[in-house]
Amino acid sequence: MTEKIGVYVCHCGTNIAGTVDVEGVAKWAAEYLKHRGVVIARDYKFMCSSLGQELIEKDIKELGLTRVVVAACSPHLHEKTFRNACKNAGLNPYLCELVSIREQVSWVHTDKAVATEKSKAIVSGGVERVIWDEPLEPLRVPINPATLVVGGGIAGIQAALEIADAGYHVYMVEREPSIGGHMAQFDKTFPTLDCSACILTPKMVDVGNHKNITLLTWAEVTNVDGYVGNFQATIHQKPRYVNTDLCTGCGICQEKCPKKVIDDVFEAGLGKRKAIYTPFPQAVPNFPVLDKANCTYFLRGTCKACEKFCPTGAIDFTQQDEYIQVDVGQIILATGYDLFDVRRMPQYGYGRLANVFTSLEFERLSNASGPTGGKMVLRDAVTTPTSVAIVHCVGSRDKNYNSYCSSICCMQSLKFAHLVHERTGAEVYNCYIDIRTPAKGYEEFYQRLLEEGTHFIRGKVAEVTNAARVPEEEGKLIVQVEDTLIGKQRRIPVDMVILSAGLEPRHDAKDVARLFGISCSADGWYIERHPKLDPVATMTEGVYIAGVVQGPKDIPASVAQGAAAAARALGKIQQKEVAMEPIRATINQDKCSGCRICNNLCPFNAILFHEDKMVSEVNPALCQGCGTCVAACPAGAISGTVFSNEQILAQLEGLLLLNLKQLELEPVPS
Amino acid sequence: MSTNEKPKFAMYWACACGGCEIAVLNIHEKILDVDANFEVVFWPVAMDAKYKDVEAMEDSSILLTLFNGAIRNDENEYMARLLRQKSKILVAFGSCANEGAMPALANLYNINEIVDTAFSTLTTDNPQNIRPNTSYSVPEGELHIPTLYPAVRTLDQVVPVDYYMPGCPPESHQIAAVIDLVVQVLQGKAELPPAGSVIGAGGSTVCDDCPRKRNEKKIKKFERIQNIMIDPDLCILEQGVLCSGPATRSGCTALCPKAGSPCIGCYGPAEGAEDYGSRLMTAVASVIDSNDPAEIERIFEGIPDPVGQFYRFNLAGSLLRFSKSAWKG
Amino acid sequence: MSDQFEPVIIGFTCNWCSYRAADMAGTARMKYAPNIRLIRLMCSGRLDPTFVMKAFAGGADGVMITGCHPGDCHYVEQNYKALRRFIILKKTLTQFGIEPGRLKLLWASAAEGAIFTDEVNKFVEQVRELGPLQWPTSGGGLEQMFAVPEHMLVKEVAA
């Protein structure tokens, strides 16, 4: 019995038909592949439309088609569409192939004759492959309703609250002592100038108090095993040296601790903290952490002031690292960003010239609970600046560092300009390349800044220096910049320079991505499943991304993504099970000789060896379908579904048009 | 076929060494079963029949022909076609007929190169540097000697084959088992396997029969068997000596590994493998313990003759079949 | 088109990176030589040396193996297995007389449509320089190679 194959060649409007003779390809398939089982070949304007799909469904029912080949766009777009059409007509969806003659032919080649010939070869490959397709069912696995959220910034917080409010359990893991992320460091948020902590802390408190959220701060995920619906995560709980069951968060230990340390995390290096500390007053959870590397007791065996004064005896110097295993169904990564290290641009003088500040430093300067109590002063802690320059695009939009735009720095720079006006009345110079104010209220905010008398200079700052050339420049920082709108070089003497540093992936983003089995782009941001249509899912089922970890964005976008990731997770939880593509390897135990060559090839540990039977076996629950063991087995004992040897070799023969040379039908695959 | 006459049996050697014939004789007294159940009509090693005797036979009159040896020249091809015509069941017997075996290693060279080498060795007395002609005119007519084809072929690349018996040679106990089966079929007590099957062999690979202990394999260096002391209880491949067992069809009872020698692959590929060498290449790639290109290259230098190693018995039966020198000259 | 030799190249791509790079090249309307025909695998680790052998034996003039960058494999480290197989294949094919320039390994991430395009174009030119392979197992080459000598035809051998 030979298969009855239907071939459908899509015009895709003029996307394909403009370059490929689609009618010609269909006619060719009907004639030249007839001996291979093609009983009907059609061409149509938009195969993915409901009318297009109906063509397929009708032919399946009326002509008794047993296989379907669609030549159209990339399988990544519409494979599911056509498989569903087949399913609706009663044909197993895995007996349908979608071959690309758009992304692979009409969009990338110009010669029409050659493009048409290549399309024929591609259709031929599809036809040969589809003959070897087998009917399959998606694998259904139960979903553990708990979710792991990694990262306690605003995106992670939003995601966690959405899921927890819906009634499902969340484990939130945050590597710092408190959640809040970078947003907790900000003073005001643009464009409304809401106090950042005021809008953030209620959510933080909700997380801390939520009965459905297990909050693990000062902790990191060290290992992840499993697959969607069934992940096992190992969390390393670093020792706080504080017994959280006894601690009341009174803060006496911090008061009494004699050791001061520069806080280069929360205070961005601008202020100090103690060796035992909570990063900020509204910290959640409100338990301090003892910094072992700077603690007098751990260094020299003396002090112990915190222990002496703690009213509940909560200090515990003997606390150990703990490793906690949690079982979850899905994971949301919201690990945020690091600031571009402005020391990589020595021409801006950060570190060398005292009054050059980074954006995060300025946030702390401006913040009422910051090291200066919100007083906008120079490094001498006394002098109020009379002139301030704000440099846009430091480390962004720059081929030498990061080519991308960091999205938030223009608004942030405008915000800084406003705050400087408000608090100091200083002259403010914003040196910019373009002003990017796309979202709601942003352009209006820019207008406001213009009306406030901000000086806008369109030019990339070449240098910040204290080398005065004229008397007016003495004791000032001089910003050297070309004002491109007037076509002149300018030297602007100011008291303070703020560098709007770009956003970069966390320094260990790549390692963390590997831990969770997802990929980073060349810039280091985590890759979404589709840049337009699926920004919070990743290629790994069950792992989502939200917030700046996916790419620079502002707070509303981070919140939206956190909620979106939560919605995706909740959708799966509600379905109670997840359907996975049945792309799996199987070992034929009769053929397997127990050579064990496959045993160390599987990164998911899906291959087991049975000593008693001297054969290996693939665990279908762990198998991710990469096919490496299928290719590796010297005995040919391992077969793979959806990408079997027969299917691939047949497609190869079809692409090389070897099937045209056969005048008789081959024996059917058994 | 008449019920009074015994069914006919033939065995022929093409480009062969004679080992297959010896393997058949090594079934010892079972040879009497052959004699009891068959009439041997053509077997050059054992009896004096001529080609014209075979030409005179009726089509499909020989029930069972065991054809060993590869197809090197036009005489081999002629006899393959003749015996196909005259036989009901044609078996590709032995590695040469199945895959090309040793003769097929000649496929790495151009035929002129081979002839040159043969006719100009140190021990060849050929002062005028003559090369043979395939035809020579005499008053009585044209005389011919067989023409060498540019490359060696397997039996089934020339004629359709009913069954395949691999091995260099096929093990005598397997030959005995096949003879038993055929006798049973003749007596109506058993059925022949589907046409095209491999018989006289197992369904797995040599490792299935090998008693050595095996663990996960991580090779940092390939060794030659004589350079290291082989642990008799541990997998040979694991110790760095390239044993082809994992890719070679079972059936021989893993004789060589049991004797302390790595399997060289004479039983051909496992069921379903289109290209034996590919299976061995992928096995080697899997056991090389490195992800660094420079180190991988260095480890692979321990296999200085890849084609000879990966396609030792299987060059003619592989997907590429021969090297460019064979056909491009 | 001119009469110049147009090589046929078979490209193996991995679903997560290099196939998406090809898709991206398409979406961005980048142009590359039409000589390449792609086969999608889930992972470059799925690449069986048999596929490469079959491609050359079947008439391809060049074969390109593509996958994710080392360290970025969607299945963690399977592209390294492809790397090992590629190295072995290259040496073995060279001994067969198939020039090393006919087999290429390319790492391309999903965002590298431009790199994919460039490398395909470069490879097509590279193979074009080497000329057609025309392995006798494809097309009518075998009949030519094993043509029965005339004097043997007189005897009317049966097939």
Image (spheres, coloured by chain):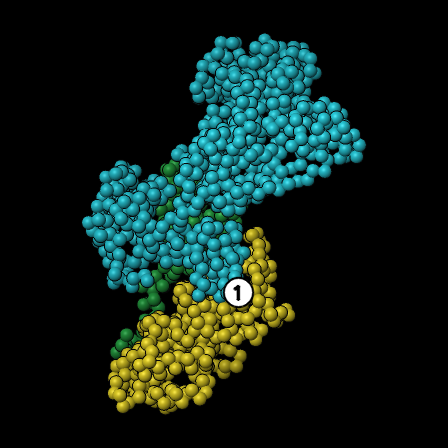
Chain colours: A cyan, B yellow, C green
Residue A395 image-quadrant placement: top right
In the rendered view, does A248 fall on the left or right side of B161? right
Disc 1 crowd, CA 10 A, few/some/many (<14, 14-19, 20+)? few
In the depicted view, which residue is nearer to us: A109 or A214? A214
Establish if B107 lies above or below A323: below
> In the image, residue A65 lies at what x, y percent?
24, 52
**Residue drawn at 56 percent across, 60 percent down:** B216
Task: Relative to A24, say whether B310 is above or below.
Answer: below
Residue B205 appears in the rendering: yes
| Residue C101 visible, this orientation | no
Q: Residue at x 22, y 44 (%)?
A: A55
Measured as percent of width and height from the top left, residue B146 is found at 36, 79
Percent coordinates x, y for residue B291 in the rendering: 56, 52
Q: Is mark 1 on a helix, strand or loop?
A: loop
A477 left or right of A571? right
Q: What residue type is labelled 1?
A: Asp
Chain ID at mark 1 = A
Q: Which residue does the numbered mark 1 point to in the structure image? A: A612
Q: Where is residue A129 in the image (x, y as percent from the top left)?
A: 33, 54
Q: In which quarter of the image is the N terminus of chain A?
A: bottom left
Camera-nearest residue between A590 and A120: A590
**Horizontal side of residue A597 vs A21, given as left or right:** right
Residue under the image location 28 percent in, 52 percent down: A67
Q: Quadrant of the C terminus of chain A?
A: bottom left
Instruction: Tell which of C1 and B320 is nearer to you.
Output: B320
- Residue at image point 62% right, 38% down: A237
